[in-house]
């Protein structure tokens, strides 16, 4: 499972957004499942930051991603109209898989930690295929200044 961490220095990417009314439940907090949507949105914006926008760049490379594994640990709750930051980083590049880590914060408060393993595949056959070299190079360049537990 993802471990809580107040250290965000390993995350070079951050996307800020406001919690919308449709994302909160009757308890007045973000419904737990929406954090996975935040992860997905963070991944999309991460790729955009790298100059590899989803889905256009994926279509051009005849590839897509499918989720193999995801996990989420809750440390606090976001509420309607809160400004939250979605921090994302590529933690590991495999042959055909990309492990992403996420942290969601509100100011200095750590709300959620999580991880998603994406597998690259042909969008028609859904058979695994290598990560496109253009994306691999962009991730390696972007993440090269961070402290990695494993080399990318």
Image: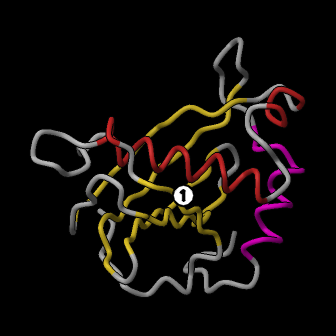
129, above or below 73, in the image = above
Q: Position of residue 82 (x, y in %)?
A: 36, 61
Q: Secondary structure at mark 1?
A: strand
Q: Position of residue 138 (x, y in %)?
A: 84, 61
Q: At 26% from the left edge and 56% from the top edge, which residue is drawn? A: 79
**Where is the C terminus found, in terms of image quarters?**
bottom right
Q: Position of residue 87 (x, y in %)?
A: 52, 67
Is 36 placed left or right of 29 in the picture? right
38, above or below 13, in the image = above
How packed mark 1 is, by other alpha carbons closer than 10 Å (few <14, some 14-19, many 20 or more), is many
Q: In which quadrant of the rendered view does residue 119 lie?
A: top right
Q: How is the image coloured?
A: secondary structure
**Where is the N terminus found, in terms of image quarters?**
bottom left
Task: Specify start and end residues of the magenta stretch as a single range.
Answer: 130-143
Q: Number of numbered discs present?
A: 1
Is 133 placed left or right of 27 in the picture? right
Q: Position of residue 51 (x, y in %)?
A: 85, 53
Is 146 placed left or right of 137 in the picture? left
Q: At 83% from the left edge and 71% from the top edge, which residue is drawn? A: 141
Q: Which residue is mark 1?
A: 100
Residue 81 or residue 14, whichever sits in front: 81
Is 103 placed left or right of 23 in the picture? right
Secondary structure mostly seen in the magenta stretch: helix
Q: In which quadrant of the rendered view does residue 59 lie?
A: top right
Q: Is residue 22 magenta?
A: no
Outermost residue, top side: 124
Q: At 80% from the left edge and 58% from the top edge, which residue is drawn? A: 50
Q: At 37% from the left edge and 83% from the top edge, which residue is drawn? A: 108
Residue 121 or residue 138, whichever sits in front: 138
């Amino acid at each position: 499972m993802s471990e809580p961490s107040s250290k965000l220095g390993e995350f070079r990417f951050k996307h800020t957004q406001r919690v919308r009314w449709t994302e909160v439940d009757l308890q007045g907090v973000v419904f737990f499942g929406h954090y996975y949507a935040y992860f997905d949105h963070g991944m999309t914006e991460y790729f955009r930051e790298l100059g590899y926008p989803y889905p256009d760049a994926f279509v051009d490379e005849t590839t897509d991603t499918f989720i193999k594994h995801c996990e989420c640990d809750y440390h606090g709750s976001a509420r309607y109209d809160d400004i939250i930051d979605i921090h994302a980083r590529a933690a590991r590049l495999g042959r055909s898989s990309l492990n992403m880590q996420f942290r969601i914060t509100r100011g200095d408060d750590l709300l959620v930690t999580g991880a998603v393993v994406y597998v690259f595949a042909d969008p028609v056959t859904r058979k695994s295929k290598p990560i496109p070299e253009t994306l691999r190079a962009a991730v390696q360049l972007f993440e090269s200044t961070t402290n990695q537990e494993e080399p990318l």
